Image: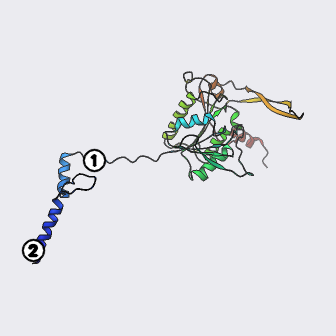
């Protein structure tokens, strides 16, 4: 009796395994086969499946500026690199040119999500300085350090002595202080109708090279300036040093409608440096200047001299 029952069970299992079944929305399933036999047949008749490669984690590109979140230069920079990684933008809600490395201490900081660059790009407007934007991005938006920080494209020059006053470059330097490779971009054209074609081309090239360079210096900070010429006239990139130049400043004295005096800063940019390896020379000869900058302001030559000449006792 037990043997007969066993034979019936085995027969039902065999029928279940070899019968064709129909499932909703699908064609008939093929009869199951012995796994070892099936593998042996496939090894003779088909090419083994290739395991897909796991793609690297998408780099995070933080972008800011000092001209404000609606500036055309910022839009141009976002457009130039938008497919090179995950873009996160946080920029001042108004122009902050000349703010240098200022930070906000006595006023609350606020951020507002904006749709300035389309649904696919995360963007924020901030009532703080460019440096505030970088600090907030790392601590409150990204919760990690981005792979690179870009600042600009600034409307106007940030070559030579301008780097000291520049909010664009201070944002980049703040990122470098936080061990984030960074680049500040500027175009020598203050017009809102400025042509950013050349700036976009070379900005993209620079960012690609940084993102693909192994063992990149985590404190790297580049000050990149573009001459106001067409992309056809741009001769390429030139690695430079900062020129010794400054503004011969003057404060124009004027009177407002109520009769009270006020003063308007004016001045003329004067280059005292005749070297052919400076950013001013490169820009005057239609090259985009690339100056590596740092936040260590120590004058090491003078330090050595003072150690020998000062009475230190």
Residue 171: percent from left, percent from top: 64, 42
From the image, tell me which residue sits under label 2: 4
Q: Is residue 71 above or below residue 17?
A: above
Query: Residue visible at 72% across and 37% down?
Result: 98
| Left or right of residue 226: residue 19 | left
- Which residue is farthest front? 24
In the foreground, 153 or 115: 115
Identity of the residue drawn at 11% across and 77% down:
2
Which quadrant would residue 200 be assigned to in this image?
Answer: top right
Secondary structure, mark 1, is: loop
> Badge 2: few (under 14), some or many (20 or more) residues near its Cα, within 10 Å?
few
The answer to whether residue 22 of the structure is visible from this angle is yes
Q: Badges 1 and 2: C-beta atoms under 8 Å apart?
A: no
Q: Earlier in the sequence, mark 1 or mark 2?
A: 2
Give neighbour class at mark 1: few <14, some 14-19, many 20+ (Cα, 10 Å). few
Instruction: For marks 1 and 2, give the one nearer the viewer.
Output: 2
Distance Cα–Cα, label 1 vs label 2: 45 Å
Is residue 223 shown to the viewer in this render? no
Residue projecting furthest to the bottom: 1
Is the residue 20 above or below the residue 230 in the image? below
Residue 76 in the image: x percent, y percent?
Answer: 57, 34
Relative placement, left or right, of 130 versus 313 is left
Q: Position of residue 129 (x, y in %)?
A: 69, 44
Residue corresponding to mark 1: 49
The residue that appears at 12% across and 70% down in the rendered structure is 8
Viewport quadrant of the N terminus: bottom left
Label 2 secondary element:
helix
Disc marking residue 33: none
**Residue at point 56% right, 52% down?**
144
């Amino acid at each position: 009796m037990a043997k007969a029952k066993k034979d019936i069970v085995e027969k039902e299992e065999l029928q279940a395994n070899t019968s064709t079944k129909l499932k909703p929305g699908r064609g008939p399933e093929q009869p199951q086969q012995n796994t070892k036999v099936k593998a042996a047949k496939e090894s003779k008749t088909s090419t083994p499946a290739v395991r897909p490669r796991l793609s690297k984690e998408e780099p995070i590109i933080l972008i800011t500026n000092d001209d404000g979140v609606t500036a055309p230069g910022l839009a141009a920079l976002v457009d130039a690199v938008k497919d090179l990684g995950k873009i996160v933008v946080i920029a001042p809600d108004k122009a902050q040119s000349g703010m240098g490395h200022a930070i906000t201490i006595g006023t609350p900081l606020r951020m507002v999500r904006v749709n300035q660059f389309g649904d696919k790009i995360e963007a924020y407007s901030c009532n703080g300085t460019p440096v505030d934007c970088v600090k907030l991005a790392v601590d409150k938006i990204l919760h990690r350090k981005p792979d690179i920080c870009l600042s600009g494209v600034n409307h106007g020059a940030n070559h030579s002595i301008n780097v000291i006053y520049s909010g664009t470059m201070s944002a980049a330097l703040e990122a470098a202080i936080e061990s984030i490779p960074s680049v500040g971009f500027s175009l020598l054209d203050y017009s809102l109708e400025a042509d950013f074609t050349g700036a976009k081309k070379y900005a993209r090239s620079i960012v690609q090279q940084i993102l693909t360079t192994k063992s990149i210096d985590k404190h790297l900070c580049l000050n990149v300036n573009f001459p106001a010429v067409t992309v056809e006239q741009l001769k390429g990139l030139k690695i430079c040093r900062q020129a010794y130049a400054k503004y011969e400043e003057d404060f124009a004295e004027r009177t407002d409608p109520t009769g009270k005096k006020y003063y308007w800063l004016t001045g003329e940019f004067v280059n005292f440096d005749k070297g052919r390896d400076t950013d001013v020379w490169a820009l005057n000869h239609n090259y985009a200047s690339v100056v590596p900058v740092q936040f260590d302001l120590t004058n090491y030559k003078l330090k050595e001299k003072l150690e020998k000449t000062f009475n230190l006792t």
